[in-house]
Amino acid sequence: MVDLASKRLQLLAPFQPWEGTDLKGLKLLIKAKGKCTTDHISMAGPWLKFRGHLDNISNNMLIGAVNFFNEKTDSVKNQLTGEYTPVPATQRAYKAANVGTIVVGDENYGEGSSREHAAMEPRFLGVRAILVKSFARIHETNLKKQGMLALTFANKNDYDLIQEDDTIDIIGLTEFAPGQPLQIVFTHVDGSKDIILANHTYNQQQIEWFKAGAALNIIRKQVAS
């Protein structure tokens, strides 16, 4: 038995499967600048005491990442309020409002230790996609296992097009297939748009992980049958 009042252990509900539609109306959580390792995404130290409690350890999500727009850590714009608040608190506000988000990153995003929490925390808090110039391979795989979209810019210079108040659509998921890029539409506050292509390395099995909501959801169904 797990004590429901425990701050260190938590029973987890399965992640929800993909809705079966393109993802529209997403908000930018953070455009990370420069190096963003697993330690920037999910810090160690005192946070490790919460590694059995996903909700609590998620309070360290991306607090070490540098925000491109203000050169600060743990300070991002909440598009629902216009205020700058800590990254986890901002993401929790989006989750409460049923607003999906996207994280944008630089080169070799997720390098360092293969900490699973660096993939689980964004998934748990409602981030729908990670779009970067390039991934550390293990972190990319960890994101796929959690049912996340792990995408890379087809043109790395498109990183510069993304603005702080953008609303974002990910198009092509209903035809999601190996080797087939997705289209991402960034609508800026002045109404103008930038449309870019995003590559991925999903094989068919990994696409099924995404559709099911996580690799574990597929395993659970197989065991049940």
Image (spheres, rainbow, N blue to C red):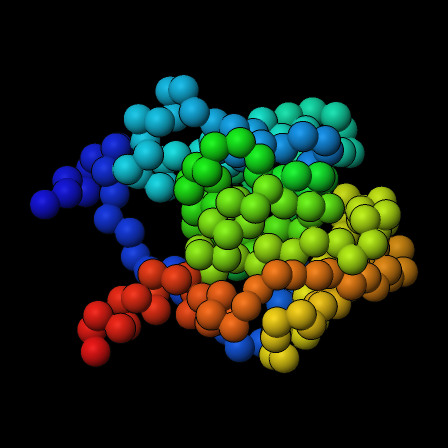
Name the residue located 42 percent from the left edge and 40 percent from the top edge: 117
Name the residue located 89 percent from the left edge and 55 percent from the top edge: 190
Nearer the observer, 27 or 149 = 149
The quadrant of the picture occupied by the N terminus is: top left
In percent of width and height, residue 9 lies at 23, 38
Q: Is residue 76 toward the left or the right of residue 164 in the image?
A: left
Direction left: furthest residue:
1
Name the residue located 78 percent from the left edge and 34 percent from the top edge: 69
Nearer the observer, 180 or 88 = 180
Question: Across the whole image, how many numbered discs are drawn on residues?
Answer: 0
In percent of width and height, residue 79 lies at 68, 47
| Residue 3 visible, this orientation | yes
| Residue 129 visible, this orientation | no
Instruction: Note whether 1 is above or below 34 in the view shown.
Output: below
Name the residue located 25 percent from the left edge and 43 percent from the top edge: 10
In percent of width and height, residue 172 lies at 68, 74
In percent of width and height, residue 145 lies at 44, 56
Nearer the observer, 130 or 26 = 130
The quadrant of the picture occupied by the C terminus is: bottom left
Q: Is residue 47 toward the left or the right of residue 81 in the image?
A: left
Quarter-wise, where is residue 200 in the image? bottom right
Q: Is residue 116 toward the left or the right of residue 1 in the image?
A: right
